[in-house]
Amino acid sequence: MDDPGPYTLRPIGVVRSPLRAVADAPNQAEGAPKALIEIDPAFADALHRIEEGDELLVLTWLHLADRDVRETHPIGDTSIPLTGVFRTRSPDRPNPIGVHRVTVTAIEGPTSLRVDALEAIDGTPVIDVKVALRRP
Amino acid sequence: MDDPGPYTLRPIGVVRSPLRAVADAPNQAEGAPKALIEIDPAFADALHRIEEGDELLVLTWLHLADRDVRETHPIGDTSIPLTGVFRTRSPDRPNPIGVHRVTVTAIEGPTSLRVDALEAIDGTPVIDVKVALRRP
């Protein structure tokens, strides 16, 4: 490998959600509740021009994940054969990063974004926000 | 913030591409060349059941990015007003993670995936691979 790392990630914000436990979190955004993305005010400038209606990718650090898992039954369904975590959306993976496509439904403050549906529990660290592409 | 971090990322692979310099990299996958994703053999099990035709999200660590940039002109077009990096796909951002949607065009070895189009230069570290969702 060219650059063995490691790299240091620091949260840029946090998810506020009625989801309190991993057991309550739906799979793959099916039925996920609305959430608030609270960005650290130190990064306020990086939100400039984000507005209601924007489609964004929110990247999270799935802090409760098991980083040693290599295979799993997708969506917890044991009738599906064991599958490498790189072919799933399981939170359990070597670098537990969540990718969530959301729509901004309201700007609730200088650094708070209301979004339509996010499958991450309350307190999940946010590590990046990007504009979504038509073909993301 | 609930959990101030930091978190430690380690590469799980590397991009092999004819793109050698950032200046050659197209914006947002327009005209991006085919690339090879070489996964560290230590993570071979995590690739289990990935096959030709799969649509994946490849997450990269954009190792040449400037992590102190907060605003930029999208796609380098100075006629577009300065915009917060969280509303762009600029590599320059606090945690420089790239999200690339690709199709697997061939399995070239136990831990090598040929993909159709990837806008990252040769040597870019890969930090995660996930199956793409219909609405990712």
Image (cartoon, coloured by chain):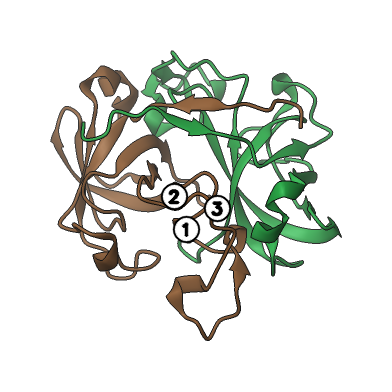
Chain colours: A green, B brown
Label 2 sits on a secondary structure element that is strand
Near mark 1 (Cα within 10 A), the count class, few <14, some 14-19 or many ≥20, is some
Using the rendered view, name the quadrant where residue A106 is placed: bottom right
Disc 2 marks which amino acid?
Val
The residue wearing badge 2 is B99
- Mark 1 vs 2: CB contact within 8 A: yes
Residue A21, horizontal then vertical, whole percent = 75, 21
Reply above or below: A70 against B83. above
The residue wearing badge 1 is A136
Quarter of the rendering occupied by the N terminus of chain A: top left
The residue wearing badge 3 is B135
Using the rendered view, name the quadrant where residue A86 is placed: top left
Q: Nearer the viewer, residue B46 or A124?
A: A124
Reply above or below: B57 against A131. above
Tell which residue pokes out farthest to the bottom in this image.
B79
Using the rendered view, name the quadrant where residue B46 is placed: top left
Q: Are marks 3 and 1 on the same chain?
A: no
Disc 3 marks which amino acid?
Arg
Q: Is residue A63 visible?
A: yes
Residue drawn at point x = 47 percent, y = 56 percent: B92
Near mark 2 (Cα within 10 A), the count class, few <14, some 14-19 or many ≥20, is many
From mark 3 to mark 1, how far is it between C-alphas?
A: 9 Å
Residue drawn at point x = 77 percent, y = 66 percent: A52
Q: Are marks 2 and 3 on the same chain?
A: yes
